[in-house]
Amino acid sequence: MATALESSATLLDQLTDGQTTSLRLTQDCLDRIAAHDTAIGAFLHVDSEPALAAAAAIDRRREAGEPLGLLAGLPVAVKDVLATRGQPTTCASRMLQGWVPPYDAHVVERLRRADAVLIGKTNMDEFAMGSTTENSAFGPTRTPWRLDCAAGGSSGGSAAAVAAGMAPLAVGSDTGGSIRQPASFCGVVGLKPTYGRVSRYGLVAFASSLDQVGPFSGDVRGAALLLEVLADHDPRDATCADEPVPAYRDQLERPLDALRVGICRDHFTEGLDKDVDEAVEAAIDVYRRLGAEIHDIQLPHARFAVACYYLVAPSEASSNLARYDGVHYGARSDDYDGLVDMYCRSRGEAFGAEVKRRIMLGTYALSAGYYDAFYLKAQKVRRLIQQDYQQAFTSVDVIASPVAPTPAIPLGSLVSDPLQMYLADTYTISANLAGLPGLSLPAGFSDDGRPIGLQLLAPPFQESRLLQAAAMHERETQWHLRRPPLAEDSS
Amino acid sequence: MSDSSQAEPLVPELTRDVVLKVARLARLHLAESEVESFTSQLTQILDYVGVLDEADTEGVEPVAGAMGLNSVLREDLPTTSLSRDDALSGAPHHDGSYFLVPPILDPRAE
Amino acid sequence: MTAPCSPATTIIGLEVHVQLLTETKIFCGCLNRFNPEEPNVQTCPVCLGLPGALPVMNRRALELAIRAGLALSGTIAGTTKWDRKQYYYPDLPKAYQISQFDLPFCDGGWMDVDDADDGDETQASRIRLIRVHLEEDAGKNLHDETQRGRDSRIDLNRAGTPLLEIVSEPDLRSAAQSRRYLEEMRLLMVYLGVSDCNMQEGSLRCDANINLELVNDDGVAIRTPIVEIKNLNSFRGVEAALEYEIGRQRQEFAECGGVYADSEKQTRGWDADRGVTFAQRGKEDAADYRYFPDPDLVPVQIAAEWIEELRTGLCELPAARRQRLVDDLKLSRYDASVIIDQGRDLADYFEAVAQRCGDPKWAANWVTQDVLRELNDRGQAIGDFAIDADGLAAILARIASGDLTTRSAREVFTALLDDDPEGEQVTVEARIDEIISDRGLATIADSGALEPLIDAVIERNPQAAADFRGGKQAAIGKLIGEVMREAKGADPQSVRAALIERLSS
């Protein structure tokens, strides 16, 4: 019996019915990890013993008839960018290698209270900077569909874990597409909530005004379930909204009547892979068949989005990463001469190239004389981009687009060309700049079997609408039921 | 890097000297090869982001504060602090009571 | 060496940092307590700057800040925000300090500082402020001065304490005036309950910027390079450091003729032991703080209603209260200052006494002398004092009504002080009555009652009586003393008068 490859809804039913136990489920996940993770590289830390103990404890409570949280013993993998008390949190960096936080992130507290089994921490691009997980200090993550291709980034590990059946659900973070793009590359559902929907307390900051935590799942319902657990108001995060959290799963069965889907054709770049183009067109056709109206929309400032992002994000990152100085936590160099040299060597040695590059870019952009021309200017352009979407959403309900210009890219192909890598973020980045919720859902495959995702965006705090629209497509196409060959091997 | 505000540069010149100064500000020790590669890569990126100059932002308010939230304040109520052990737990160098660093000789930068 | 040039204009600006009296830190719920004995026990992920931690502004810190701004006559902004001030120092765990850059909560303002104490007619100088802003404090570094090369130690208990930075215009003109400015600032903050301004504990810190304008040999007015003096940790130290620096700058000017190789602002430390300022190791480059708005904190709208509520809720400020004591209660400026300087509680006590006994000057005498002396001797605050305002007023009322002489009143005062607080619950009036009767302190109002005693004393002291009659005025002293010993409640003036009358008849 395939275990974590089943949907979370199915698994919950099986747990309730007694057809399986959390312990067995957790053990299955651990077995799959043991069997496949050397090849895939999804996990940085597997918390076997505590996870099994937690699972057993939940089973006992279930048997005793005690009420259980929403996740009721389901294993959940957590991107190594979130603080987990008792489990290392490395952000895939040598800077935090071996760091065990003395506290839990807010969402981790929520997961524990929901009776999730925290099975381990997943691989990522170092400090969430990157689009392939090749920037991890501890090796890349490969998409389970093609082991010579990247899982995407920066939440590659979480996406791959779900795709490979190593956990039915996973948590990632998205600053410029870091949930949606790996979801696309791994053929799973990944959702970035509205900025402020989910608490960032305990999320190691990359770009504070762009970061959001979100769910990965094999299907839309699972994403909805996990989002219900993650979202709430946290007074420890001043940027976290005090908005009621809908029961996202409740509405999923109901299609959206008279759905208006917006497409910005101008935005579809020249570099768009033909398979991706076809898959996205096919997805749009699905909506047409389901009675949706397809509208052309304009996003006049979309061409500035990448530039805007690559000023705002590195600027904030340069500041957020300044604290890694080898004093209070983190790596300290063994070889230095005095305090300043200690800072410089510790950081120089422990940070990878992409991280250093962005710190340099951000430091420069914020330095004396340049603030107005760079950061301030970018924040103004950002307002224009937000306004583009506000305008577009007056005539459409959701906006559809590709997630990435290509399917999963071969390992090593973009690492040496940072600017090219940045340009590939073109479809996902605007959602972060505008604070909009967005998701990627499986929408087909390339000719050579690599998954392709469709991106949907909705107005702020309209995750329900997003999930409903996604569910419509999912019911119609069933792409989400396909499994990577590797995963099927184990069953 | 002077303190006075300069006129908006179209494509700021990123010389090696500037790169080293920025690295110093960022407390990053760069290997020689990094200095070279960063100089060219950063120049390329800055060149690209210069496209923002084409955006008309006259009278446009910069985005500030998350999604229009404002005035988030908390009450002056105590919460449990970390134990000292927990507070020191990540420190590369400590003596059980204090964080330890090489002797601080320079005055505070401010 | 040429003689120092004169006259000089001294130009001083002070930057004062004041820790706020909140229960918790500015961005987290750790206790805001001075605790050097137990390092690193008042910390949490937020004030440690752990990866993933986030700040949330303490409403009470903002409230106290606004009160201070209002009391300093500053303009409170309708919208304010916080910015990251980025630099590296081991006691700054995030490698940035959350401060305020271009939109501080308070703009402008001023404080009046009395010119030198010369009696009741005093001029005051208005020292203008540039701004007041709210920021977080860093932790504490402990250098090991004894051993070279030994690690420095960091205690982050203090990191995240809410801090008010009050920046003055360079309007101060002397070291003494600067000290008075600090004292007045401290008084104001203490009155408002904003801070306890204890320089020893670091809840008030001060940096000074000073330069001089001097005239060179050609008659050209030249300004010396500005010197910032840091590490000042007492009011006396501030004054001494500034005096020293004035002398040093004059000397330097005389030596170089007003021609400076480097006119950049210099930073100097104050060595209190040797009484000198010393150049600090040069910073490598001028600090580039790369200010930008902190994306973790949202801007705060300060509602006009809130500002008004805080403004009307301000206590009477010390300067105004001091003036009122002089103008309305007719106290000397000196007495008014003594009372005000002791803080609100004592000033409240004094005014209660003054009102109840009807004689502010008397009340002032007793409060500034007897009460303060006892408080000092006993190390007490007025709140713990055994005699409350009603009690003291009652004593003073007895003097006014003639029931007690001043001398006897003092004895009653002392007796009340030694009262057992757990003792019988009687009214203070009743207690005073008790003491008076126990010790026979009642004034003998009826001088007739004194007559037999006077006669008896004159009879017992024939020599003294004779001496007096013979013209030796001083001889009466012995007789007065003897009468007083036996009739404690007697008023010395009346006794003297009665004796003189008796002896003359």
Image: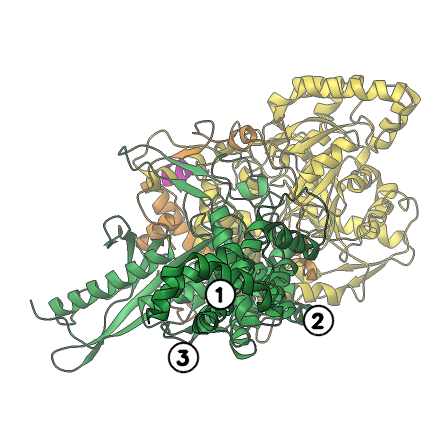
Chain colours: A yellow, B orange, C green
Q: Quadrant of the C terminus of chain B?
A: bottom left
Q: Is residue C122 above or below residue A79?
A: below
In three-dimensional space, the C-alpha distance between marks 1 and 3, rounded to whole angstroms, equals: 42 Å
- Residue contact at pointers 3 and 2, CB within 8 angstroms: no
What is the crowding at mark 2: few (fewer than 14 residues within 10 Å), some, or many (at least 20)? few
What is the crowding at mark 1: few (fewer than 14 residues within 10 Å), some, or many (at least 20)? some
Q: Nearer the viewer, residue B55 or C200?
A: C200
The disc placed on residue C123 is: 3
Q: Which residues are magenta?
A: A344-348
The disc placed on residue A449 is: none
In three-dimensional space, the C-alpha distance between marks 3 and 2, rounded to whole angstroms, equals: 36 Å
The reply to whether the magenta stretch includes residue A314 is no
What is the crowding at mark 3: few (fewer than 14 residues within 10 Å), some, or many (at least 20)? few
Residue at x-position 41% and y-position 80%: C121
Q: Is residue C385 left or right of residue A491?
A: left
Specify the subunit that label 1 lies on.
C
